[in-house]
Amino acid sequence: MGRYILRRLIQVPVGLFIVGSLAFLLIHAAPGGPVTALSGEYATAELRQEIEARYGLDRPLGERYLDWMGRAFTGDLGRSYLHKAPVMSVILERLPATLSLVLPAALLSLVGGAAIGLWSTPPPGAPRRVLGPLLALVGHLVPTFWVAQGLVLLFALTLGWFPVQGLDDPRLTAPSLADRARHLVLPVLALSLHQLALMALTLRAALRLEVVRPYMTTALAKGLDFPRARFSHALVNALQPVLAVLGGRLGATFVGAIAVETVFALPGLGRLIVTAAVNRDHPLVLGIALSVCAVAMVGNLLTDLTMNRIDPRMAIDRDEAHAA
Amino acid sequence: MTRCHLLLSAFLLALTAPFAVAQQPQTVVAAVSADPGHLNPAITTGSPTHAVADSLFNGLLSLDEKGDPRPDLAVRWALSEDGLRARFELTRDAKWHDGRPVTADDVKFTFESVLLRHHARTRASLGPVLEAVDAVDPATVEFRMKRPYPALLQQLDVTEAPILPRHVYGEGDIERNPANLRPVGSGPFRFESYAKDDRVVLTRNTAYFKPGLPRIDRLVFRVIPDGATQAQALTTGEIDFIGRVAPSEIARLQGSGRATLADVRFGPGGGNCIMTLGFNLERPALQARQVREAFAAAIDRRQFVERILVGHGRIADAPISSGIAWAHAGGTFPASLFDPARARALLDAAGLGPDGEGVRLTVDLVQFASFGRYADLLRNQLGAVGIRVRPRLVDPAAMVDAVFRQRNFDLTLVSYCNGSDPEIGVRRMYVSGNIGNIPFSNAAAYRNPEVDALFAAAGSTANRARRAEAYRAMQRILVRDLPYLWLVETDFTVAWKADLAGFEGWSGQFAERAGRR
Amino acid sequence: MRRDPNLIDSVDRRLRWIGVVLLMPPLLLALLAPALGKLTIGAMLAPPSLHHPLGTDELGHDMLVLLAQGAQVSFAIGTLATLVALLVGTALGLCAAFGGRLVDDLVMRAAEITVTVPPLLLAIVLVALLGSGTLLTAAALGIGAWPTVARVARAAGLALRGQPDLLAARALGVSRPGIALRHVLPAILPVVLALTGVLFSSAVLAEATLSFVGLTNHDVPGWGHIMAHAGPYLRDAWWMWLFPGALLIMATAGVTLLADA
């Protein structure tokens, strides 16, 4: 067990190293580069050469790799070409906006997903409820940006209940929680849909296994009605895979945030990486990709370790399989 | 509290109430399409930076609606007879945002140490021509040139040549100067805060050297990349100003009754733009002039104006934009050229008959993805005469690489902005010395010594009549040779909330004179 | 790719017929696209009518033809990405199952690392490097999904290891690759193919998102691109937003429901 934890812990930096190296190689093998974005429309050949020299783009690949790797280990992810500032600080500046989107969405998806999951689980023997799972399935397949556009169309443009863009009203001289909340309603709704659907399906699957367990039968025999038994007993046990899924989905949530941030013009990491990609701002693209991977790896690690404490059997499937 | 205290408090509160109301700052919120990245307009030509940072600085001159120079930091100016010296007298009232006075030395520093090294457009145009910039005395600047440069006065506004304070930007590597994110300028607004990809907040410069300006207290720039979202935000009142309205939004904004719109021919950083189809003259299939004439005859440019520009623009009827009226050879490339039957005949004569599927020629078209609608129409129109077009829609970096570095294309679509003088944006398209790995240079790889000579002649004198002659002669040659097809002149439209006025959409300092109607 | 495929089992199996019904329109559109003719320019922004059953867009293109061509793009990318994922995943999964402990270690570690990179993120990074391209996008999306396939293939392969006919074949001198191809592959194929639904729908959705944010470069616009263009016209031309979205959902839901057959 201890060996397993150690192994998983080591995997994170090793994994990051590999991902980072691959990404670096790919990026620097690319044609073009940021010179166009930096030099603009009226540049001369001389200026372009100067830009290349200034950013060290004319040095050999190996040298640039070692230089970058060395710095990356100390947390220095280089400087963004376009923002003319350290990548790390650019990322950290944008992080709050993305978090204020992602965290409420995660919460909403958990609560909403739990509700639908519970509702979709009838007592054993009763006919299956398919509406919930079907809706969840559709909800899972709908493109996030489509949902976002639809929400804008209905609630912002037609009904006028919410603003069409932004995190808050730029006219206010002091930030207001109410204003921020009002701006976040539609984006959070759009972002939470996928996760909510997934939660609902996962919980339903887990609950169906739980409701046939002996302790449920006992509870029902003791006079507890089914919904309450489902909620206070089965739910607790069924939550474990749900939380596992939640932990493992950090990367996917970020991807959803890209679409939502684009539709609502939110100043987050999702939009940042798209702009950086279009402008070939290599250090920034690399920095964001690495950060997302790092967070995803840590999330996976925590999830695995948590699940491991509860169920040690999961750790050793590989060893068992090879013993066969 | 006693009743007395209560009464006193109420009375005091009532006294302050009018002040409380008056203290609501008058804020104008402008939309910009991309995050500026940094706020130093002298080291970049990128429009995101200029859209925001130009309001923080001044140039020696500024341009009015027609493109003629008017005073900014310079109140008087004179050119010498031989055109080799230009003297500018600066106002004595201008101060930097930190209180220090603006002097001729700052101008000298800006040109010699900053612009000529980092500002691509000024460097490309003034660089070869400028001998030196002298600070004759603290309020007088003299430009000494190697040869007469006719477009000098057009390139001294805040977008082309913003003046920076030496005492803030003079030390060290200017690219890493922290003032790039907390700028100090002389402009109508001063910097307050910058939240990346979200907003930039500027406040009124109370010590601005132009009396009575600016009229508003706060200018906030909100980053909204999508044109439709910008227009929606204007109708809901979330923002007040849009610098470039997407054509698809114009009708809606006009219909909403909430916005005032104005068409502008040129704007900060380039104007008088012509959407141009370029032939790669190094491709054998396109080398026969007849073939290029066939392309010209196959394209119905009116459809572009109608469907893409929604009426806000016009057919380009000459290689130089009609916005530069004195050089524009109107009618040399008229709409009447559209004649599909003639196109087919020309292709037949060139030996390109239709094959089994009716296809005579297949070409690829490399262009920005954002111009996708042009590609659609071109494919349709050229397809009707048997020319199959394969569009390759790519992002800007890839397009520049494919077209200018690798020269891997048959056709390309470029929005070439002429600027306010042909020296700025026209010459680079046609001179044989400008073919190579330079973005938006001579994409066609057109080589004609006659045209080279005419450009040299037009660029070496300040006499407008002689220059006009040279430009007209050259345009006649160009429409005969057809290295490019000049499709449409694209105006752009500026919009602002109906209860505001005074915006100058063509200027970098668009909000200098803006305020409530 | 993003979720445990076993979850779908919990949906009523009879709903699989719904999958067929849902899949028909987009599939038909994709297949009939060439027959529908070229994109012509008609009236701009016309609502659905007899002449233009799905309306027209802002340039006057008939939406039916546009969406049919988009269907081709989406199906092409979905299929390509799925094939890449299946090929790479199955090959590596079988290597892991039969190649000995070291190989298994390597493959599983690689899988864990790959899993942390969302395929869409990988595609975005690739666009930043190499520019956008249909093949590249499909490959990137497919490669991001190989771990899921590999895990399933590996598990199935491991389950087969002790089987008598395999041992017999080994004893008779059949080579390892031969065993893999003739015995193992047919046995695990059904299991692996069950993933097709997930793989396909994830790829199609990812491509739509990439189109939407402007990072794709198709000769012909995909559904995501069409929907991105619909932004300005949400209020006036609801058909530009509704139909592409509906088709996307139908295609992905249809394939997902069907694949569990």
Image (spheres, coloured by chain):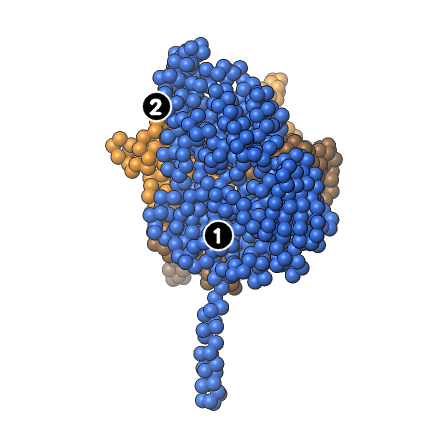
- Quick one: C162 or B6, which is closer to the camera? B6
> What amino acid is at disc 2?
Gly
Badge 2 and badge 1 both on one subunit: no
Determine whether the residue tagged by mark 1 lies in a helix, strand or loop. strand
Q: Is residue C228 left or right of residue A79?
A: left
Q: The disc labelled 1 sits on which kind of residue?
A: Ala
> Could you classify mark 2 by the number of other residues whose Cα lies within 10 Å: few (under 14), some (14-19), or many (20 or more)?
few
Residue B90 in the image: state x and y as whole percent.
63, 52
Among the chains pictured, the one given brown colouring is A
Tint of chain C: orange
What shade does chain B have?
A: blue
| Chain letter belonging to callout 2 | C
Residue linked to disc 2: C37
Total numbered badges shown on the rendered structure:
2
Q: CA distance from mark 2 to mark 1?
A: 45 Å
Lateral position of residue A13 relative to residue A235, left or right: right
Quadrant of image for the C terminus of chain B: bottom left
Q: Residue at x 45, y 36 (%)?
A: B490
